[in-house]
Image: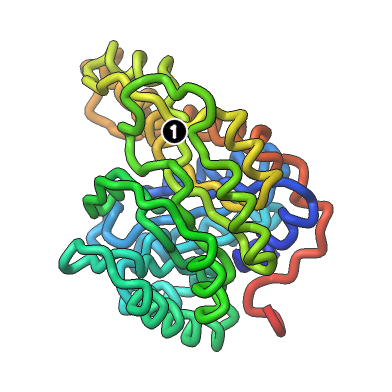
Amino acid sequence: MPLITLRQALDAARQGGYGIGAFNVTDLVQVEAVLEAASEKSAPVIVQTIVGASAFRSDELFWEAMLGAVARYPEVPAVVHLDHGPDERSCERALAAGFSSVMIDGSVDHETKLPRSFEANIEITASVVAKARKLGVSVEGELGTIGGAESDGTPTTEIILADPAEAEEFVARTGVDALAVAIGTSHGAYKFTSPPDGSVLHMNLIEEIASRVPGTHLVMHGSSSLPADIREEINRVGGELPESWGVPEDEKARSTKLGVTKINQGMDSHMAYMAGLRGHLAQDRLTVDPAPAQKRGADRMRAIIAERMDVFGQAGHAEDHEWVPFGAAGM
Ligand SMILES: [Zn+2]
């Protein structure tokens, strides 16, 4: 029962009035931390990874391990999702590996680093949807430009907010299950250079887009909070992270009431992991075994993810739905 599609997870979230966190992982220890948090909180969860973002030389080896880990948590309804698929080939690889969901980021041409035209974005996205459909896999697309740098280094400096009319046309012509929309957030560990005053997120834009694409789920990218206490902790043990502010927790919670069902959060859990890792290494200067440091990192990551699951509302929803396993008829 554990592996489910993104469509199923997000439909259940909408029905239940909650959001589901999608947590980025680059290591098997982190995959376990996400699943442990979900198990502890009895929550459905999305585990996601970016092509080439792990230290594994082979994405396929890591992906296989991710799926293997999910299978060991039968109590956790989990989506295994490719985040920011840069091209069709990457999505095809994730489909072949057995992922239950893929994102095709058609908003930017990852070769030239230039934004794709609306038509070119539709073309590549529709093509991935056609391939994924045959396998019952869900697809997320992206519209508009979400600022900041992706973990794959894709530089996008300017935030171009999503256009509601374009969103409607994009969904109608591609059939995506979920849509990443630029609503004021940016990627990465450095977001806002001063504390956000008032609303960071364009709440009325979220509402307007949601009303135009009622059958599709909205995804919030770049929605980490960048907790100041964790940043300071990292900097006390050798880090040099500049002061930066992310998206306040209450705004994320509010967005889930307006139509956002998938909340991407990579940085907060990476920061927590790094605080544990660096903390251990700074304390135990004789260590040559990396495992104890990784373990402390994973404990910190599990703890912050468990906290976020309460904020997003997914905690306690693992058992209130009849999940259909990915691969079963019709899903
Ligand atoms: Zn993103």
Q: Check disc 1 and report the residue beneath it.
A: 268
User: Is 258 on the left or on the right of 229, as rendered?
Assistant: right
Front position in the image: 46 or 260: 260
Where residue 3 appears, as percent x and y from the top left, is 62, 65
User: If the image is split into quadrants, where does the N terminus sit?
Assistant: bottom right
Q: Residue at x 71, y 84 (%)?
A: 329
Q: Which residue is drawn at 41% across and 78% down?
A: 122
Front position in the image: 62 or 171: 171
Front position in the image: 48 or 97: 48
User: If the image is split into quadrants, where does the C terminus sit?
Assistant: bottom right
In this view, 66 is above or below 291? below
The part of the image, by quadrant, that contains residue 145 is bottom left
The part of the image, by quadrant, that contains residue 244 is top left
Where residue 101 appears, as percent x and y from the top left, is 52, 68
In this orientation, does residue 160 appear? yes
Front position in the image: 97 or 65: 97
In this view, 125 is above or below 63? below
Beta carbon of the mark 1 residue lies under 8 A of ligand 1: no
User: Is 167 on the left or on the right of 195, as rendered?
Assistant: right
In this view, 156 is above or below 40? below
